[in-house]
Image (spheres, rainbow, N blue to C red):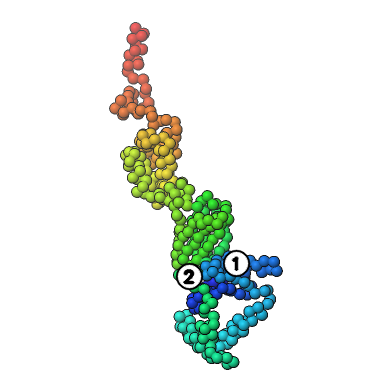
Amino acid sequence: MKSETWIACHVNMYSYFGGATRLIIPDNLRVGVDSNTRYETIINRSYNEMAEYYDTAVVPARVDHPQDKSSAEGTVKYTSTWIIAALRNRKYFSMHELKAAVSKKLEEFNSKDFQKREGSRLTAFLNEEKSFLKPLPASPYEPAVWSKATVQRDYLISDGKNKFSVPFDLIGEEIGLRITRNTIEAFFHGARVASHPRPEKRLCDPIIIPDHMPENHRKYLSYNDDEFLSWANSIGAATFAVVKSFLESGRVSEQGYKACASLTKLADRYGHERIENACGRALSYTRQPSIRSIGTILKNGQDTVKREPDSQKTTTGSSYGITRGAGYFSKGSDAND
């Protein structure tokens, strides 16, 4: 039996009774009792949490001593024969139909007169036992399963179907997990450090709270084309052209995110003016500049050197490599004279 099923049976039992018992005397099944020796009894954490919620105490029977609850054992056997055996040849097409049939037979069983005394199990409960029950809490207990996990480098935990984030500074630490039908909670040294709602379906991506991430990972999560282009446009036309080139250089724009992020880091280091100048110089060499070439320009200070306009460049000589013009030879002839 699974722990959540075992606890759900108790919740349904208290709901049916309309109150909680002072004691619970179960067998020593694994989902309820971790250890029961002559010196101590250790109750499963999930089971103990449920008992505390209903203000009841778990006192397991002695190991291999079912006679400690002989009346309960006999009733279970009799109920199995009277209800389950009576329905064994019937066919049901849904769990709802089956539960309705079992509930009807249960009411018949409880209302059946005793053979050796007056009344029935129902009247005995109402007249003799119900007054000893404790009042129920405002809402039923939500079954929870406790387990332990070590936080991996991706700072994610799993409920077996989906993954959820915890604070990144817990990487390598052992934490406690409390999993219910609707939530998953992480505890460290008794304090709750994370809580997530559990989706019913399996998701492709993990559920991550940005505050659980390191700063550099949080920045990466917010990367997108519009953010990079808006940032580049705020600096200048050359930076905008470079960023646009990065985003269009690969098969998909995500392939250029790393170069764009590196460019933002260079801007933080060298300033917006130098980045704009460096991007302009890189574009003068090629239409598809690389982040490495821009970094080299900034490192060597080439962006701070003023470029001469094309109109001021000398055009002495021809395209065939002659570097000495007519002036050079005229000077020579003057010197010989």
Corner quadrant of residue 302: top left
Give me the C-alpha separation between circle 1 and circle 2.
22 Å
Does residue 89 appear anywhere in the picture?
A: no
* Residue that label 2 marks: 137
Which residue corresponds to the image point at 44% horizontal and 35% vertical from the top-left? 296
Disc number for residue 332: none
Neighbour tally class for label 1: few under 14, some 14-19, many 20 plus, Cα within 10 Å: some
Corner quadrant of residue 264: top left
- Is 22 placed left or right of 203 in the picture? right
* Residue 215 higher or lower than 157, as above or below: above
Query: If you read the primary sequence from the N terminus, does the residue marked by circle 1 or circle 2 appear first?
Result: 1
**Residue 131 location, x and y as percent?**
52, 78
* Residue that label 1 marks: 44
**Residue 54 location, x and y as percent?**
52, 70
Front position among marks 1 and 2: 2
Does residue 184 appear anywhere in the picture?
A: yes
**Residue 173 location, x and y as percent?**
57, 53
* Residue 247 higher or lower than 123, as above or below: above
* Residue 202 higher or lower than 306, as above or below: below
Quadrant where the N terminus sits is: bottom right
- Is 255 placed left or right of 121 in the picture? left
* Residue positioned most to the bottom: 115
Secondary structure of the residue carrying tag 1 is loop
* Residue positioned most to the right: 38
Which residue corresponds to the image point at 58% horizontal and 55% vertical from the top-left? 174
Which residue corresponds to the image point at 36% horizontal and 8% vertical from the top-left? 336
| 168 or 178: nearer the viewer | 178
* Residue 209 higher or lower than 37, as above or below: above
- Is 31 placed left or right of 241 in the picture? right
| 255 or 214: nearer the viewer | 214
